Amino acid sequence: MNVIVTPVVLLSLLAQETKPAPKFPLGKETTYVTGPLDKDGYIDYEAALNDRLGKGITPQKNANVLLWKAIGPRPKGGRGMPAEFFKRLGIKEPGPKGDYLIGLGQFMTDHLKLDRNDMEWVLEQHDWAIQKPWTAREYPRIAAWLKANEKPLAVVVEATKRPDYFSPLVSRWNDTDQGMLIAALLPGVQKCRELAYALTARAMLRAGEGKFDEAWQDLLACHRLGRLVGRGATLIESLVGIAIDHIASNTDLAYLERANLTAKQVQQRLKDLRELPAMTPVADRIDLAERFMYLDSLQMLRRRGLSCLDGLMKFDPQVQPKADKNELEAMARIDWEPAFRSGNRWYDRLAAALRHKDRAARDKALDKIEIDLKNLKKLAVDPANIAKLIQGKEQPDKMVGKAIGDVMVSLMMPATRKVQNAFDRSEQVQGNLQVAFALAGYHREHGRFPAKLEDLAPKYLATVPKDFFSGKPLVYRPAKKGYLFYSVGVNGKDEGGRSYDDDPPGDDLRVRMPLPALKGKKAGADR
């Protein structure tokens, strides 16, 4: 039977013939994903990761779309973001001029024309403005800054009401670049801290004006902002999201102490806190984005040569020296499969350890991983000696690939315990916050605080949360006009309710009412 080759069929056949051959064995245990492949046959990990992160998220539901409309195209000045970033968001790049957030530093310089001494004075006032109710008469310059940011803050509040969050990880400026995923740009994420400080300062201004409902909406927006940013793919985004939520939590307590709320209003505030979306687990970042960064960096080593190790060792993945012909030929002869498999096993193991719900079991698993990682680093070949393993071998064996994998794991396994501890603190702070609001509700109805926290259940709390770090009840000490309760914190030691800002400092996570007096020089009204 004759086959008629039409132009369409011919183009299809040519496309199949020119499809790049994979550079590695593709699979879950090696490359983890099987595509897309770039024109040279390498996995495009950046595209693969963004495809997963953005799946099913439309611009209309993506909070990050509005956040960029609030902060503008160049949140840190300079070059801005690659076009691919906004293409992934599904929007046009915001124009160079607009009603964008004006940072306090920029406002003091460009609008208030302050000298250095006056700037320090205003910054001190700003620190106080997020810790206690205040009025525009007290801090007129802070009030003017918030006034100038009314429009972008309105956009931010609206953004936090959206259900989804997708922030593309983009490292390449054009289609010809070979960017490293680990060098993806995150300027908008850091700018969200400024948004949090603006929202909490405005909340305290509104509280100082007696606008308690409006103040609470700003605080809820700040909480939602932190939880949205915390959904980002990287550990950095996780930490920034936790920090933002912590900023809101601290201001919540100042609001609770000073707001003139009825028992019913306190109960509604408590309901609002309980209905906030949960923070995304740290294990999710390890399982996906952090794993992809390892695999992408390993692949880039194959692509560019051993000189890429210099950038990773110096924590500067932007360093992109070019390898000579002989080095690239040596890279092509290495069996890279052991390096891919080894890395995936480590990331599988770390993600599984972090998913333990019991903290003691999780710490035990992390302890074992840290011991094994230290041993790996001791046995790993010095990066400077990797080249010696390759030299003189026409076909380097699997041991060379394994040696490279060991070096890469040693360099790139993230310090997840610190991030997980920050996550645990955040969870405990949220539990403590709910207890504080429940105590306020009890006090509004009974004219006193309960003798024990168990009295809050079931009317004010379904169950009273325990100390996550000790597994025991929170330490609670009621007083005639207030109370102190606390968790022992990460170190597990009962330090009498001393926190990081006490002298001597402690690790306890406490709530004290009335709130402790603010320390440092009192920032009064403008001079």
Image (cartoon, rainbow, N blue to C red):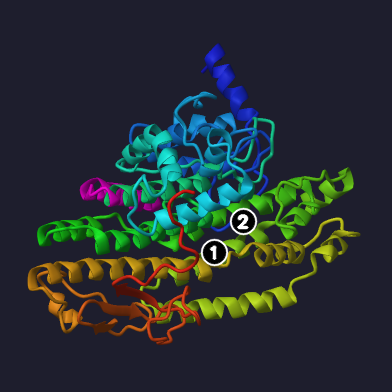
Residue to which mark 2 is pinned? 294
Residue to which mark 1 is pinned? 347
- Between the residue at mark 1 and the residue at mark 2, the CA separation in whole angstroms equals 9 Å
Circles 1 and 2, Cβ within 8 Å, touching? The answer is: yes
Residue type at numbered disc 1: Tyr
Using the image as rendered, state which of residue 301 and residue 338 is in the foreground: 301
Q: Is residue 58 left or right of residue 286?
A: left
Residue at 75% x, 58% y is 314
Q: Is residue 369 left or right of residue 205?
A: right
The x and y percentages for residue 432 are 30, 71
Q: Circle 2 — which element?
A: helix
Q: Residues within 10 Å of mark 1 (few under 14, many from 20)?
A: many
Using the image as rendered, state which of residue 231 and residue 122 is in the foreground: 122
Vertical order, 174 against 464 (above or below): above
Q: Which residues are magenta?
A: 208-227
Query: Which residue in the rendered view is the most extreme toward the right?
Result: 392
Residue type at numbered disc 2: Tyr
The x and y percentages for residue 259 are 23, 58
> Does residue 4 appear in this view?
no
Q: Circle 1 — which element?
A: helix
Residue at 47% x, 79% y is 363
The rendered magenta stretch, by its main secondary structure, is classed as: helix
Residue at 58% x, 17% y is 10
Corner quadrant of residue 136: top left
Query: Residue 201: within the magenta?
Result: no
